[in-house]
Image (tube, rainbow, N blue to C red):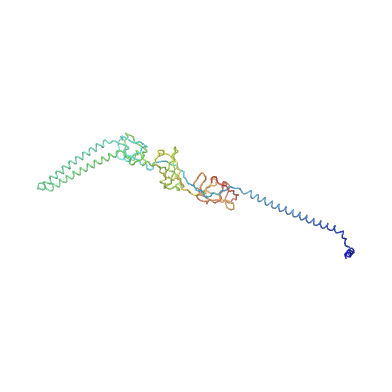
Amino acid sequence: MNYESSLAAESDGAAPADDAPPQTAQGVSRRRLFIIGALVLAALLTGALLLREGEGGSAADDADASVPTVSVIVPGMTTINSTIDATGTLAARREMPVGVEGEGGRVVSVPVEPGQWVKRGQILAVIDRSVQNQQIASASAQIAVARADANLAQSNLNRALKLVERGFISKADVDRLTATRDAAMARVNVARAQLGELQARTARLNIVAPEAGLLLTRGVEPGQVVTGGPTVLFSIAKGGELELLAKLSEEDLASVALGQTAAVTPVGSGNSFTGQIWQVSPIIDQQNRQGTARIALAYAPELRPGGFASARIEGRAVAAPMLPESAIQNDERGSFVFVVGKDNKVQRRAVKTGIVTAKGIAVREGLSGSERIVFRAGGFLSPGDKIKPVLVKQTGS
């Protein structure tokens, strides 16, 4: 059966079985060429894709290179013990000027010196009263004369009353004698009043302290003639109490209150003295835009009225964002900062600054503390600029 088959094949002109290998080698060559072509095409496509990606990456790199890298901070909230520094002049809290209360005259003696403590009613200066003493003596004699006349008029009236019962003197005579007695008694009273007036005037010749306190100035010497009027001869700090007239800006004046403590340091002294604000000026000086906070102080030898002193007023503790000076910009519209948004674009935001400390400037209004704030480069940016933010930590925070 097999043999027939082979003969039939030969008779049909088919190739013998030994010629099969050449036909298989030709098919392999074709497939090899096809595979090589496919690989070359894939390599070309891959190169094109890589070239396209390289061009896109270069563009992205160029875009990233144009965005500036800027340091930013997140200030948070800081508890600040607010303090206000001020300067001013020391003065007596209640200064009492003392002058001539009476008519005046020649000063005989001045028994006090500035810096001494005086009591209420203590004599500060004695004025000559020789003339007044003679007037007092004369007024005393006038009282004696008037009293004698009154006694005589009373005796005459008593005798008349006894005679009128017997009918020797009329009732009209009794009325006349009564009037004479009354007039004499009135003259006694007048003389006494005149004497009291002279004594009072004489007593007013001496210049006395109206209240106890520290004698600050003395403006009279023995032998000097003084007269009544507005001239101030002595000044007294009532009770020795002093004060500092601290000058504050409008903003600082609005932030202080009665009872706040202050440390006062006079010029030339290394000691500080604790005082309290007892009065805040209700007005602002139109020239320098300042007001006065009056700080009460107890007496101390280093505190001299008229001297210059500085004060540090302790305020209330407040919580506020604290920014370095470099983060706050200023222009004609006021203070502002650059806030970085979620898209890394900066936006201008107006702020109001407050207390200035060694750690920075407190922001009273405009920030919550959670924003990203441009640290230093604010002067080179404009609203809407895109940046590459780099978070930094504040020094001392």
Relative image position of residue 203 (x, y in whole percent): 28, 39
Could you say which is closer to the camera, residue 39 or residue 106? 39
Count all numbered tags in the image, as a single digit.
0
Relative image position of residue 107 (x, y in whole percent): 31, 35
Relative image position of residue 3 (x, y in whole percent): 89, 64
Give the quarter of the image for residue 294. Answer: top left
Could you say which is closer to the camera, residue 124 or residue 292? 124
User: In the figure, 84 relative to 22: above or below?
Assistant: above
Question: Is residue 277 rendered to the left or right of residue 100?
Answer: right
Question: Is residue 21 rendered to the left or right of residue 118?
Answer: right
Relative image position of residue 236 (x, y in whole percent): 36, 40
Question: Is residue 74 rendered to the left or right of residue 235?
Answer: right
Query: In the image as oriented, which residue stretches furthest toward the front?
Result: 1
Quadrant placement of the N terminus: bottom right
Could you say which is closer to the camera, residue 395 or residue 89? 395
Query: In the image as oriented, which residue stretches furthest toward the top?
Result: 223
Give the quarter of the image for residue 214. Answer: top left
